[in-house]
Amino acid sequence: MIIEPRMRGFICLTAHPVGAAQNVKNQIEYVKSNGAIANGPKKVLVIGASTGFGLASRISAAFGSDAATIGVFFEKGPAEGKTASPGWYNSAAFETEAHAAGLYAKSINGDAFSNEIKQQTIDLIKADLGQVDLVVYSLASPVRQHPVTGVLHRSTLKPIGGVFSNKTVDFHTGKVSEVTIQPAVEEDIENTVVVMGGEDWAMWIDALKDAGVLAEGATTVAYSYIGPAVTEAVYRKGTIGRAKDHLEATAFEIADKLKDINGHAYVSVNKALVTQASSAIPVIPLYISLLYKIMKAKGLHEGTIEQIDRLYRQRLYTGGEVPVDEKGRIRIDDWEMREDVQAEVAKLWGDATTENLAEIGDLEGYRLDFYNLFGFDVADVDYKADANELVNIDSIKE
């Protein structure tokens, strides 16, 4: 079938299997071009492995360190005349490339918050790998059914303590407008922390450790974001920020639990990038479009694969002590948060209008990255050609 992007708000309802596969290949080639990761992981579990930072984590481990990888995700498979979700096609392409390279790669599709998927993952590790030496936690779900209470919790994106108003942009049209968001109530905060905080990460590590599938010296890392002053009211000081605070505090609790196996737990604070999740957050698309313009001009721009490849090579696997900030966090957002970069963003923010954004920002770069997430507008792909939507993931029997 001929597959075209079909939009609804900030979500694309279709995905292109050939574009997704090319996108995965491009990321693999980037990692390979940097050579082997010395002291890198060898048996890796990635929870939330199908898109964004999770996918980049899996690719970097496999093709930078020849690691065996297990990926856990919750994606929609294809049906005749209907495309799969982009993460499905990403994962299918990853497995194809990994197997062609002689690497172990298997995937589990299901609710990573559930006890059933945790047990299924443990059983697979025991059967095939014995133990894992790196666990990446990169879930980005708006809802979580709690495995103990059965309650369905929904996260919200709201400021705390007052109404938030600021600029935003519709990245489809380029229209800059004012957005106003009402403040959260306590229930909003609690639900967001349950969904996006560190509880499930801790549950995963407890389950893996109790089952004996964490190797001596194992490392686990989860991803967070801080961002600039212009976004903090709706992000870092809002409901999501409370969840990130909880996630970061959980790293210390997990680290204590791993001491007896000489293990480590970290939170990596990553750069602002175009993801399905970030596209839904008001203010963030405008900030990213301005940030991209500045960072590209300075030669500092990174996508997800460049970020994670640098995280592995220059932070986690240097052979020495992992560098952290005063709160124990790895800072791979260091280039984004440079004073000169943020000063220029702040100036452009004040100047940004519908009329000048195409000139002072990189809205086209934002749009391209967004469409790439769904396998569209990827270079060297013929989108006028018939594409087979019925792509299977080798290790998953639907």
Image (cartoon, rainbow, N blue to C red):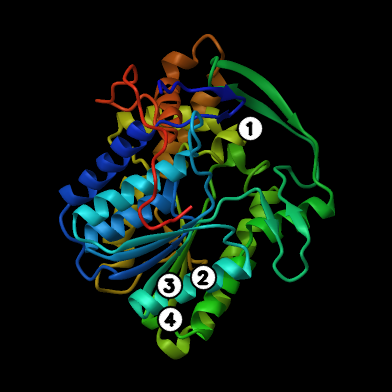
Q: Quadrant of the N terminus?
A: top left
Alpha carbon of mark 4 to alpha carbon of mark 1: how far?
41 Å
Between 139 and 251, the one nearer to me in the picture: 139
First of labels 4, 1 by sequence position: 4
Q: Amino acid at mark 4?
A: Val
Q: Earlier in the sequence, mark 3 or mark 4?
A: 3
Residue at 22%, 45% in the rendered image: 30
Whether residues under marks 1 and 3 lie with C-beta atoms below 8 angstroms apart, the answer is no
Q: Quadrant of residue 338?
A: top left
Mark closer to the observer (3, 4): 3
Name the residue that disc number 1 marks. Answer: 282
CA–CA distance between discs 2 and 4?
Answer: 13 Å
Q: Earlier in the sequence, mark 1 or mark 3?
A: 3
Q: Residues within 10 Å of mark 1 (few under 14, many from 20)?
A: many
Q: Nearer the viewer, mark 1 or mark 3?
A: 3
Residue 120's label in the rendered image is 2
Three-letter amino acid code at the position of disc 2: Gln
State yes or no: discs 3 and 2 in contact (Cβ < 8 Å): yes
Which label lies toward us, 4 or 1?
4
Q: Which residue is mark 4?
A: 213
Amino acid type, callout 1: Pro
Q: Helix, strand or loop at disc 1?
A: loop
In the foreground, 138 or 207: 207
In this rendering, would 226 be left or right of 384?
right
Q: Position of residue 82 (x, y in %)?
A: 51, 31
Name the residue at the top extreme: 355
Residue 391, quarter of picture:
top left
> Which is more toward the observer, 285 or 52?
52
Please report contact status of discs 2 and 4: CB closer than 8 Å, yes or no. no
Secondary structure of residue under mark 4: loop
Residue placed under numbered mark 3 in the picture: 124
